[in-house]
Amino acid sequence: MSELDLLRALPLDIAEPSEEARARARGRLLRHVRRSRLGHRRRLLVPAVALGAAGAIAVLVNIGIHGDGTASAAPVLRRVAKVAAGQAAPTPVRKGQFRYTKSVRAYTSGGKDWTALGPMVREIWLGPTGGRLHETSGKPEFLSAGDRARWIAAGRPQVNPPEDTAKLPPPRPLNLPTNADELYTELHDRAVGHGNATEPEMFTLVGDALRESDLSPALRAALYEVAARIPGVELVGPATDRIGRHGVAVAYVDSKIHERHELIFDPNTSALLEEEYVELDGNTYGYPAGTVTGYATYVSTGVVNRLGQRP
Amino acid sequence: MTDAQAIGASLADPEVFAVLFDRHFDAIHGYAQRRVGPDLADEVAAETFTRAFDQRRRYDSSRDDARPWLLGIAANLLRRHWRSERRRLNAYARSVGAAEGERSGPVGAELVAALKALTRRQREPLLLLAWADLSYEQIALSLGLPLGTVRSRISRARARLRGPDVDPQKPQEAPNNV
């Protein structure tokens, strides 16, 4: 027996990872992926066509807020669904054209003993045959002064690559039904068994789909209707995003991992303006309550005639 | 879809990366478990995939199988846990000794002792060979070392496990007494 065989034959009672450990690890990866996906491709703002929803914010703040501030978001979401349904279809992207989107997004990265949000300006050109992504890195935002100090002590390692360009394949069709009942069932089925709890996963899936402004008005309306039906979606109230636009915020609190996922949208256009992950007391990372661990601001969008062009 | 294709697709559609998790989590977990035990293995294996996700742009797309790359990330993370690894090796030594009893002598216990005595640079490639079934080339890839370096480190490590006097890299010190 060679020493290698002896090594292999060591009595190591190796067990398969437990289902629980595997599910936990998968959930952790997917949450991480989610943060990275904030501001990701096809997250486009609806062209700012305000249709028949003048004064909606004023109406919204008076809807269903209870004393404890955790009002149901359903009435607000249903109203926005109506706005979405009444909007014009997005400009189609023809062969040779690209849909351009710009967003600013950040999610946590870090080293052994420091954590920072690494903001990236993300620009995407996507057409029927594929496209391009271009990202430029901004100044890191450290979770605390201590994190910054430890980052300096570690020799100021790069938080994100300063610049990144990638070729993108053509977008995959979403294949979602526009009937709200069917859509609810579909998203529920997709949400089950992901390693995350079902309702927050559904809320995330709705958010994911809403970033796609090239969706039909009917599908956007159905998505807001589904969001209204997900148990536990809360109304946060009027909110301003990082570039000063006013909207209304709804959120889902995942009580299992003590994290709030917040969406801010424009009630006049139904466009998603910004989203954010906020850690709450007892969160899995041990961050102070209120720590933002990811955000994306959807800045602008438009159809252009060549790669690299901006609207 | 190969791993390389899944990683490429995940640049545009990040959730595709879950394919890598589903394919390789058990293997990474198994390797980490051998090195540091089941509890830490949960943590190391989970962290391996979030790290891998962050580093996916740097993946060499000419490599279809991502397991060596993932094991390299895991190996990096395992370096933090050298104390646990030493404890685990001590436990092996005890269990090997107990299992063999008077039957076959202390071969296993000696082996574990020799394993403990290896430097990290020698032990890491050796264990990727023995416990993760990687080829020399895959080990080179996973640790970011030249192939020749991997060969010589493993051959030194193996020689040291065989006995103190048979290091093939230093023939002048190693009489042919195998």
Image: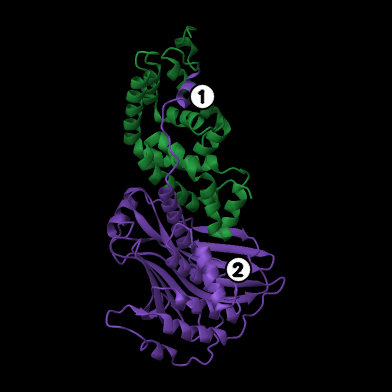
Q: Chain of mark 1?
A: B
Q: Nearer the viewer, residue A147 or A184?
A: A184
In the image, is residue B33 above or below residue A297? Answer: above
Find disc 1 in the rendering and name its residue: B152
Which secondary structure lies at badge 1? helix
Q: Colour of chain B?
A: green
Q: Which residue is mark 2?
A: A174
| Placement of A237 over or under A147, stated as above or below | below
Q: Position of residue A281 (x, y in %)?
A: 28, 63
Q: Residue at x 45, y 24 (%)?
A: A7
Determine the residue positioned at 59% across, 81% down.
A218
Q: Amino acid at mark 1?
A: Ser
Please state the horizontal and vertical placement of residue A244, each as a whole percent of the image.
Answer: 41, 79
Front position among marks 2 and 1: 2
Q: Position of residue B101 (x, y in %)?
A: 34, 16
Chain with purple colouring: A
Type of the residue with mark 2: Leu
Q: Is residue B156 left or right of residue A311?
A: left
